[in-house]
Amino acid sequence: MKILNVLRREVRYARAAFHFDKRLLPPPDFEKKLIGQLRQHFKNLPPSLPSPSWASFARELKELVLTSDPRAFLRWKVIQNTMFMVNPPYIAALLQELHSSEGWLTLWHDALKESPFGFPSPSPLLPESSGNLIVHAFHLLQLHNATRLNFDQLKLVIEFGGGYGSMCRLFRQLGFKGAYVIYDLPEFSYLQEFYLQGLGLPVARLIDQDLKAGYNYLVTDTARLKQVSPKPGSSSLFVATFSLSESPDQLRQDILSLMQDCHYYLFAYQSKFDEVDNIAFFEEYAQKMSDVRWMHRVCDLFEGHYLLGKRPSDIGRAK
C-alpha cells in the first residue's frame, strides 16, 4: 500500500512539478502526516546556532516550514540560495561531460531523472532533470573516472552535510543498495527525513542498532556517528561536497578522525572559506593519509577543487 501511495503521488506531481504555479492539491493523509512531523520537529528545535548568518537562515527556514506548504520547499529562495542550484551558468558544460562519458546510457542517463517531490525547478537543457541533480552527478562522475568505482558494490556511504537528501537519492538511482548515513545539523536532518520519506525511502535515526542495507540513516552528533565508523577493509565511501570545507576546524578534525578507515573519499571544496585556506588544509590531510592514493583536481568549469581518494585494493572496482 505504501508503494502504491508513492506511485500515485509521483503521477500527480509529475503533471504539475515542472509547470509550478504556487498552487498544490490538498495533501493526502500520508503527506499530511509528513508535514505534521516536520513542523513539530521545527517547533521543538532549540535556538542554538553557530553564526549570525546561519541564525538568519534558520529563522527564515523555520517560518516557511511552519507557514508554507513544505511540499514545494525546493522553490523557496532560502533553499535555492543555500542547497539547491537552479541553473548556474556552467550547467551546460557539466552536462556535456556527463553526456560524453562512457557510462552515459548505462549509468547517468536514467539516474538524472529528477523526482517531482519538492517541486524542483527543471533544467532547460534536460527538462526531466534539474541543475542541482546534474551538479551532484558531475561530482560522482569525477570519483568514478578517478577510481573506476562501481557504486552498486559499495556497502556503506557516509555523507557529511547532505543538504535536503538529493545526493542520497542519486546514489539509490545509481544502484547503491547498502546503508547510507548522513551527518548534518538538526534543521537539515529533519528536512532530509521529510524529503526521503516523501520519496518512499526507508529512513531511520541512528540509535544503538546495526546498519541495514537499503536504509538511510540520519545523525546529528559525532557520538552517534562514531557507532558506524568504517572498519579497515570495508567497502565504504566518505562524501563531503562543499560541506566539510565550510566547517569549523575542530569539527573537521573530529569528522575526519572517524572516517580514517574508509576505502574511498570524495571531497569537493572551494579555495577559501571564512579566511581558511582549504587548498592547504586538504593537501596537508592527504599527506597525513599516505596509505590512500589521492588525486587532486581543479575544476575549471566552476570555482572548485576535488580531492579523490582510494585505498589500494579491488573493492568495488569496475571491470
Image (tube, helix red, strand yellow):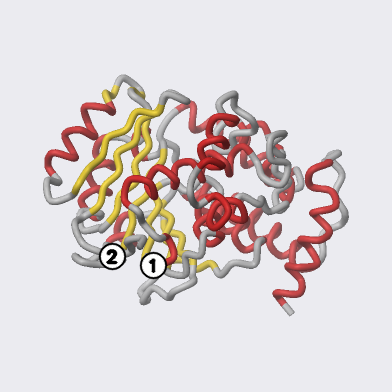
The circle on residue 315 is: 2
Residue 210 figure quarter: bottom left
Q: Residue furthest top?
A: 275
Task: Write down the residue under mark 1.
Answer: 153
Q: Nearer the viewer, residue 318 or 268?
A: 318
- N-terminal-most mark, 2 or 1: 1
Callout 1: helix, strand or loop? helix
Q: Nearer the viewer, residue 27 or 89?
A: 89
Callout 2: helix, strand or loop? loop
Q: Is residue 129 left or right of residue 103?
A: right
**Residue at image location 27% in from the left, 49% down from the top:** 255
Amino acid carrying mark 1 in the image: Gln
Q: Is residue 198 left or right of residue 192?
A: right
Residue 77 figure quarter: top right
> Mark 2 and 1 residues: CB-CB less than 8 Å, in contact?
yes
Label 2 crowd bin: few (<14), some (14–19), many (20+), radius 10 Å = some
Amino acid carrying mark 2 in the image: Ile
- Expressed as whole percent of the image width and height from the top left, the position of residue 263 reads 26, 58
- Expressed as whole percent of the image width and height from the top left, the position of residue 227 reads 29, 66
**Residue at image location 74% in from the left, 62% down from the top:** 31
Up/down of 91 relative to 257, above or below = above
Residue 304 figure quarter: top left
Observer able to see residue 191? no
Q: Is residue 207 left or right of residue 251?
A: right
